[in-house]
Amino acid sequence: MKPELPLVEIANATLWRGKTCVFEHLDLLIEQHERVAIVGPNGSGKTTLLKAINRELYPVAKPDSVFRILGKDRWNVWELRKQIGIVSQDLQQRYTPATTALEVVVSGFHSSIGVHGILADRVTDAQVDAARDVLGSLGISELERTPLMSMSTGQQRRVILARALVHNPLTLKLDQPTAGLDFAASFDYLDRIRRLSAGGRNIVIVTHHLNEIPPEVARVVLLREGRIFADGPKDEVLTEENLSEVYGTPVRVTQIDGYYLAYPGGSAKT
């Protein structure tokens, strides 16, 4: 059997966001079937890296640079979306408040924001049926015709998760998945992610909140100011020393039932 291609293979990559060079000489390898958290403070490069993996940003073209997703340098974005499902608050906010849950999920087949205009004619009965099945699997069938503006934030986030799952992708990329959710919605969402992980999904989660990292995630990539500060097993990376240095403030860390929690370690530096 041929060895599986890496999910993400990056070598000597340079990434710009606007006029800012965020990464230079970036090296990162994520294998398939890994469950990885990318952690770091605001401005560390998390969002830029995620957008590059999503093919929303592209690295500088250089002969000695590599940036491959599932072994390919070039992707039709619509085909890539079938391989990797994306969940983010940014994606959620791009939908108009009047968009219904069913429209959001069906739009996942077209890598679009909604299914208005010409796209409405391309929606098939099979796509609608598949969207309904996914909504049902997440326990929100009753929201099918409900506009986003009439839902709680937690319900909206589950609809975005349904959109990501409609292709049944092997990999899910989650960008700060519980941002804006209350305790009940956060705990419910994390439980759903854990179940998806236990079912065999690859999980790549981007966050600066340690409590968002499910116990099933074994590897952490810790970013600081556009470089990888540490990369390895969770218990070796999420140390008080590493986090205090990266976040520039004393950080204490505790572990409860497989979850890591951070809390103040003393007076902030002045």
Image (cartoon, rainbow, N blue to C red):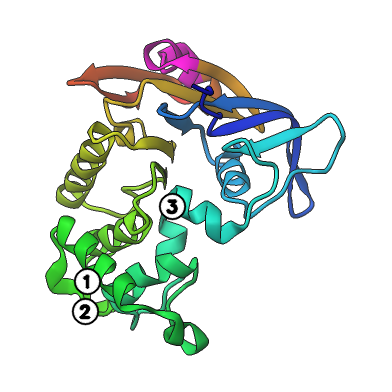
Q: In which quarter of the image is residue 133?
A: bottom left
Amino acid residing under circle 1: Met
Residue 237 colored magenta? yes
- Of callouts 1 and 2, the N-terminal one: 2
Find residue 151 and name its label. 1
The residue carrying pointer 2 sits among few (fewer than 14), some (14 to 19) or many (20 or more) residues within 10 Å by Cα, namely some
Q: Is mark 2 on a helix, strand or loop?
A: loop
Q: Mostly what secondary structure, the magenta segment?
A: helix
* Residue sitting nearer the eye, 93 or 122: 122
Asked whether the residues under the numbered discs 1 and 2 touch, taking CB atoms below 8 Å apart as contact, a structural biologist would say yes
Q: Any magenta on residue 132?
A: no
Q: Residue 146 carries which label?
A: 2
Magenta-colored span: 232-244
Which disc, if any, is residue 86?
Answer: 3
Locate residue 25 relative to residue 63 in the image: left or right: left
Residue situated in front as seen by the camera: 166 or 191: 166
Q: Is residue 270 visible?
A: no
